[in-house]
Amino acid sequence: MKNNPFNFRISSSPTRPKRHNRDKAQQEFDVADLVNDGPFGQPLVGDETEQQSPPDEKLRQAYFWIVNYAVISPYYDIEYNTHTPQPFTFGDSRAELRLPTDQSYSSFILLPLLTFATQRKCLFIGGPGRGKTASALLMGLLAGDDSKTVRRNTLHGHPQMTVADLLGNPLPKDLMQAEDEADIRISWRSWLKQRVKIIDEYNRIPTRTQSALLSVLGDNYAEMFNQIYECPSAAWYLTANDDQGGGTYPVIEALKDRIDVVVQALPFNPRFLDELLMRVEQNIDPTDFFPEDLHFSVAEMEQMQAEIKAIKLPGTLRRRLEYFVSQFEFSEFSGDTFEYQSKDTSRLAGVPRHFLAQLESGRDRLADLGCQTTNGLSVRSLMSLIIYAKALAYFRGNSAVSLEDITQIIPFVLHSHLHQDPDAPLFADADYKTFLSDKVGWLRYLFKESNLAFDLQGLNNHDPIAELKAQLDQGLEQVSERECRSQLQKIEQLLTSFSQSNKLTGVIHSDALTLKYMHQRYSNYLRWLQSR
């Protein structure tokens, strides 16, 4: 490594005040911690630390090193507060700027780091020259490679890219002499073995080559001439100039669905031009000074993933997520069969969404959140939401996910998974028109409105369906015939009360199907008891 003339230093531990109080899901803010230690700790050169930092602390040190020295991203769009922040309003739109009261973060740096920690897949979107590839490059340095190796193994999408360009070539001698495909050896591309994989402008890759990429990205293996190359677990970083189909080729849906999180590169703030001036005049690239102490070994990466999975998601928050998710897939006039009343049913049949919307005269299309989307959420997107919420709590030094963690992570995980219906009444309202372009703001609005409705219905205190399901989840082995009949009666009474409602909503539809499932479990068990 070159001499470090600009004093690029690692923040000292702890980067989060009171990190030792790990058992608290919510940590209390203490002004003394900031006065004594500073928000980022006293700077230390990496080799001066007495002992190696644990993975979560090392991850935070990496965040502050990158945000302070490597990538110019003076934004705090992931806000945390211990008390109500001070707001300032600007302009005719009354745009609000808040001063966070707890440690807050730039999504452009934090989300790629969480992707590295969880070994998932991140898409950077933004105009050319916004730092997308540079940010991905830094993630490769975290894995221990030098900048030349990371750049050499970065794939650059172009319209002529073939499957051989992507994966490798068969050895010419084997190709000429082999009697069977199994005898053909492949010279696999070196990027396949990397633990950080970077694909620049992935929407310029031809459709056929995208299909080959899907096997690597989705299933961690490459295939050519009946030969299989097993790839190690990796964090993926892809870039595109937009997320609306721009590029030489449209991205196949299966490939887009594999992306876990989308991060938008925000514009450069000209007040930081002095930083660019220094880099130009001194011919300096911060990646040349990346601290070796921030390299993660394979063992550390595996430890970090295990610790993230161990973070708790409280049942009360899981219930809020269930309520939120249940509002989007339902479409009453997509099917006559109750189970087929989903937006996916009409999508598969090619029935236009606006045609079905005309039939939904009984729904309050302004208040019903499901009316704002053209689709529901897949199992894969929900799994991504859970793991990133856990990773965010882990990064903040907590042992359990908080409501604020979910609120902050939802817009980035659901960005490419939940699609807006531009004809929805909400977007015709002048106060909400900006949501058509500000998808992060819209997704936060959806979750906020869902939580308000959840609290208004008192579901946090009394949820009869959750209680019934909890009893069923304990098993049927010791349930008597009398208890079984009692549970069946409760289920039927709840279904009767739902059916007497004035309208059918996504939440009621989901709950009714859950009750039907439980009714079947108890009915089958009752018949088995009677057969004895």
Image (cartoon, helix red, strand yellow):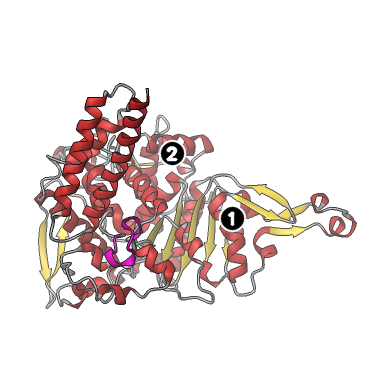
> Does residue 30 appear left or right of residue 488 in this picture?
left
Residue 101 is at least partly visible in this image: no
- Above or below, comparing residue 481 to residue 367 in the picture: above
- Above or below, comparing residue 211 to residue 79 in the picture: below
Residue 401, position as x, y percentages in the image = 27, 41
Corner quadrant of residue 39: top left
Q: Residues within 10 Å of mark 1 (few under 14, many from 20)?
A: some
Point 19% across, 78% down: residue: 428
Question: For the C terminus, which image quadrant?
Answer: top left
Q: Which residues are magenta?
A: 330-340
Query: Nearer the viewer's eye, disc 2 or disc 1?
Result: 1
Q: Is residue 336 magenta?
A: yes
Corner quadrant of residue 243: bottom left
- Above or below, comparing residue 23 to residue 119 in the picture: above
Residue 79, position as x, y percentages in the image = 22, 54
Q: Is residue 11 magenta?
A: no
Point 42% across, 50% down: residue: 115
Mark 2 to mark 1 CA distance (whole Å): 23 Å
Q: Residues within 10 Å of mark 2 (few under 14, many from 20)?
A: some
Residue 321, position as x, y percentages in the image = 26, 48
Q: Which residue is mark 2?
A: 305
Q: Secondary structure at mark 2?
A: helix
Q: Which residue is mark 1?
A: 215
Point 62% across, 61% down: residue: 212
- Please name the amino acid that badge 1 sits on: Ser
Foreground residue among 138 and 325? 325
